[in-house]
Amino acid sequence: MKRLTGIAASQGVAIGPAFVYRPEPLTFKEQIIQNPPTEINRLLQAVEDVQAMLIALEKYTQENIGEEESKIFEVHRMFLDDPAFSDEIKTIIRDEQLNAEAAVDRVSSDLIEQFQAIDDEYFRQRAIDIKDIAQRLIRQLLGLEETTLASLKSPAVIIANDLTPSDTASLKRDMALGLCTEIGSNTSHTAILARSLGTPAVVGIGKLDISSGVTVIVDGQSGEFIIDPDEATLIEYQARRQAHEQARAVAIGQAHQPAVTLDGHRVEVVANIGSVAEAEAAVKMGAEGVGLLRTEFLFLQGDTLPSEEEQYRIYRAIADVFGQQPLVVRTLDVGGDKEIPSVEMNPEQNPMLGQRAIRLCLARPDLFQPQLRAILRAGYERNIKIMFPLIGSEEELQQAREHLEQAKADLRARGLPFAKDAEIGIMIEVPSAAVLADVLAPQVDFFSIGTNDLAQYTLAVDRTNETVAHLADPLHPAVIRLIQQVIQAAHRHKKWVGLCGEMAGSPLAAPLLLGLGLDEFSMAAVSIPPVKALLRQLSKAQAEEIARRCLQLPNLKQVQDYLQTVNNE
Amino acid sequence: MVETTITVKHKVGLHARPAAVFAKTAQSFQADISLRNVTRDTAPINAKSVINLFKAAVSKDHTIHLTVSGADEQEALAALVGLIETNFGDAE
């Protein structure tokens, strides 16, 4: 038995056989073949099989993930049939008597090189698609199984160095008992995916030497990962798993009741969403509205900007799901670590400090105006609120408001109905905005604290840098103090404050945030039932005492330890 | 043989969907169709291939030269020019 500790990324306990997912680079020999026509037939058969595979994958993705995400496989199918690809391969087999694998590799390598040389990011990106399709074809020719997680046939605990969106695109929900990755942080793709699936996960465990089939335990609460547990440990964790599952079932059952503390204080518990499907899922989990609608998904679909009409239809569809419950729509937040194909951005030395989010929108009215008009229109007779990301100064807020007025004037001129009095808020995620909260508060209707970026900027830690990511913890005393200042400043001006970072859904942070006076907790839908259940067990007075204690602690470790003790009580 | 020079006004040029539509339309004709990106000064490519169209990297405001030869060359050229002039049916 071996016990390791990593970062607790998603609640719950998983026990089961390990499935070690380590995609190997493909190896094959370059060979001279005797009979080119036979080799070409072998190629054609493989192409046909891959076509069928892509059709299945397209259909699966369409049904399980989304229409837009599935379109990439259609492009792959066109590539596979393209004369510049398939005819070239056949020519090499025929003229040079080369085996099919080597011919595919040669043609794709040439194409990749040519694509990568183009001075246009969109066309350069297509190199990845060529690579993907070539590998699929070579794998088929070699008779190798698919290396994606779709090949997982029985439930297991998935172990990997890290998981990318393409690895997990085909992952069947009930096949992943738990996840454990060698690298990664609380905000990496694996962690976020695990939380949205409700799958227990531990990330950043460090280099693992383990083979598939060994029994392992993932404890997503303590961050423990146990390899080959002994009998006593197994029994102990089986009991924990059962307790967790029971608690979860009870919490889901009560998720539609409001979160009222023991002493009668009610807080709003809402969801972070990024699509119509997630809106519906959030309602099922007991969301009382949306604290953060990420609008980036609309801009990720293909290479053209969504029109005002398209945006309006989607925002309206989401607003209709929530009726008169609040829906906070965040305006486009791209740049930094989020690139989108339809928006051309200059490469920056330091993108997280560059022209991202509101800065980009203020510079690009062609992006900003249609979105503002679409949101305003969707908000007509609905409870839509508009939120600007990354505001760092009063000037930026004023400019954003001027843009909003412009959008309203245009709609008035066009005679379209729109939400004339939609509430306006800003994300507090730049330390300067937190410090100036008392200046900004009178000019908005609400704040929403984005703790992921606030922690990163306050602590000067790059969240995507594995070696330092763990330092970007919003429980750091400096961040907690900023949160306190922001809430106090807002309340002095009778404005409400939400929090839409990962922190809002953390059971560890819930008592602290309640004690600091947070009005609205916005989180991944799956976190809503347990957080509501937890808030109901607390009293506001007791939480205030916990917050007071936290604010006096000198360092992150002591805050974490203290809140862990509170959580265990 | 018929030929023409035209400027692509579509906001993203011959990117994913427009390129796919363009290649599919080209494939529906018998005639050989070649395209040259005049702005980038690339070599002529077979316009029935999406991969080749991508390699020609036609962005917004690039000028292209189309050469069509075969039995249905008139119809083919008219169809392809029509696609470009109507911005592939996308609204501005």
Image (cartoon, coloured by chain):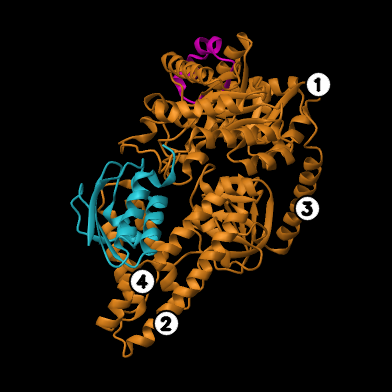
Chain colours: A orange, B cyan
Query: Which residue is denoted by mark 2 in the rendering?
Result: A42
Mark 1 touches mark 3? (CB < 8 Å) = no
Are dots 1 and 3 on a single chain? yes
Q: For marks 3 and 4, give the one nearer the viewer.
A: 4
Indicate the position of residue A103 as horizontal and vertical percent values. Answer: 32, 75
| Element carrying mark 1 | loop
Q: Tell me which chain the residue with mark 2 is part of.
A: A
Disc 1 to disc 4, C-alpha distance:
69 Å
Q: For marks 1 and 4, give the one nearer the viewer.
A: 4
Indicate the position of residue A61 as horizontal and vertical percent values. Answer: 57, 56
Mark 3 touches mark 2? (CB < 8 Å) = no
Let me know if residue B42 appears in the view. yes
The amino acid beneath tag 4 is Ser
Q: Which mark is drawn over residue A86?
A: 4
Mark 2 touches mark 4? (CB < 8 Å) = no
- Foreground pick, A7 / A168: A168
Q: For marks 3 and 2, give the one nearer the viewer.
A: 2
Query: Which residue is denoted by mark 1 in the rendering?
Result: A264
- Foreground pick, B12 / A122: B12
Q: Tell me which chain the residue with mark 4 is part of.
A: A
Q: Which mark is drawn over residue B73?
A: none
The span shown in magenta is A428-448
Q: For marks 2 and 4, give the one nearer the viewer.
A: 4
Residue at image point 34% right, 44% down: B85
Disc 2 to disc 4, C-alpha distance:
13 Å
Disc 3 to disc 2, C-alpha distance:
52 Å
Above or below for A181 versus A488 = below
| Element carrying mark 2 | helix
